[in-house]
Amino acid sequence: MIKHFLALANFSPSEISTFLDRAYSFSLFKKSPDKINHLLKNKIFSNAFFEASTRTRSSFEIAAKRLGAEIVNFSPENSSTKKGETVYDTLKCLESLGVNGIILRHSDDRLIELVAPKLHVPLINAGAGKYEHPSQGLLDLLTLKKEFGELKGLRVGICGDILHSRVAGSMMVAAKKLGFEVVLMGPENLIPKNEFSYENFDKSLSTLDAIMMLRIQHERHDGIFMNQTDYRQSFGLTVDRLTKLQKHTIIMHPGPFNRGVELDDEAIEHPQSRIWAQMENGVYARMSILEWAAEE
């Protein structure tokens, strides 16, 4: 049976918890990598990224190498896609060459659902479309779990371009499955109409256990112009707004972030910021995904 990792929506609460427990255990081997660097020996994964990425692509590569696997980085600008080859044909080519799994990032919202049934190796969603970013969802959950121990009952705010955010999509799915609260904040025209509550940013800051800041994804929509100065005044996590946070509230951001727009430099480097920790946790979360996908 081929094990695709396409969306957190496909997994039960207990399965998500298993991923998190395994990711946490991998974090404990940070200073003794020799104890785990054989787990995926002789396995080969392909990073098939048709969309720009720093954190996701690099952390999947590091995750694979820490487990002893090899990684093939596919770059569309230097490939046969320039000659008219379809994405599906590219993925089937990688499969035929003998990779043990394909890590896919693409802007097409529906592509991953169309190609997954046709592949005979695991397909891992590394951010395909705008609906879910499940590996980012796992690392965000791992960050919360390491901070608070329990996820159930937490109150997590998400502020920004939620309508176009795969990150927010996975967090909302996880909230329903794992029993924590998500509240949405930001420009009303960038908030999806769903069962999650929309709240005033300034009034809600003092009620949150975690605040996830998102950038405006100009590359994903046309016709929406937002002045950066005005946005910062209305929805930026500024120095003044930092004083509204509870002492235990953590600051999160999936990156890339726009300094001085959705959050100030002081927020990024604040003692309550977990932004850099999220990036580190991304390696452990993706190690758990690769190990699971490679299991016979």
Image: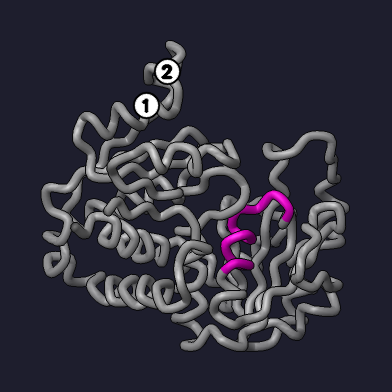
Percent coordinates x, y for residue 42 in the rendering: 12, 48
| Label 2 packing within 10 angstroms: few (<14), some (14-19), many (20+) | few
Q: Are marks 2 and 1 in contact (CB under 8 Å)?
A: yes
| Label 1 packing within 10 angstroms: few (<14), some (14-19), many (20+) | some
Residue 169 magenta-highlighted: yes
Q: Amino acid at mark 1?
A: Thr
Q: Nearer the viewer, residue 263 or 43?
A: 43
Q: Is residue 15 above or below residue 86?
A: below
Identify the residue at horizontal 36%, vertical 32% (top origin).
91
Q: Amino acid at mark 2?
A: Glu
90 on left or right of 111: left
Q: Which SS type dominates the magenta stretch?
A: helix
Q: Quadrant of the C terminus?
A: bottom left
Residue located beneath label 2 in the image: 85
Identify the residue at horizontal 69%, vertical 45% (top origin).
217
Query: What's the mark number on residue 143?
Result: none
Residue 220 lies in what quarter of the image?
Answer: top right
Q: Quadrant of the N terminus?
A: bottom left
Residue located beneath label 1 in the image: 90
Q: Nearer the viewer, residue 7 or 75?
A: 7
Q: Earlier in the sequence, mark 2 or mark 1?
A: 2
Q: Nearer the viewer, residue 260 or 289?
A: 289
**What is the span of residues highlighted in magenta in the rendered image?**
163-173
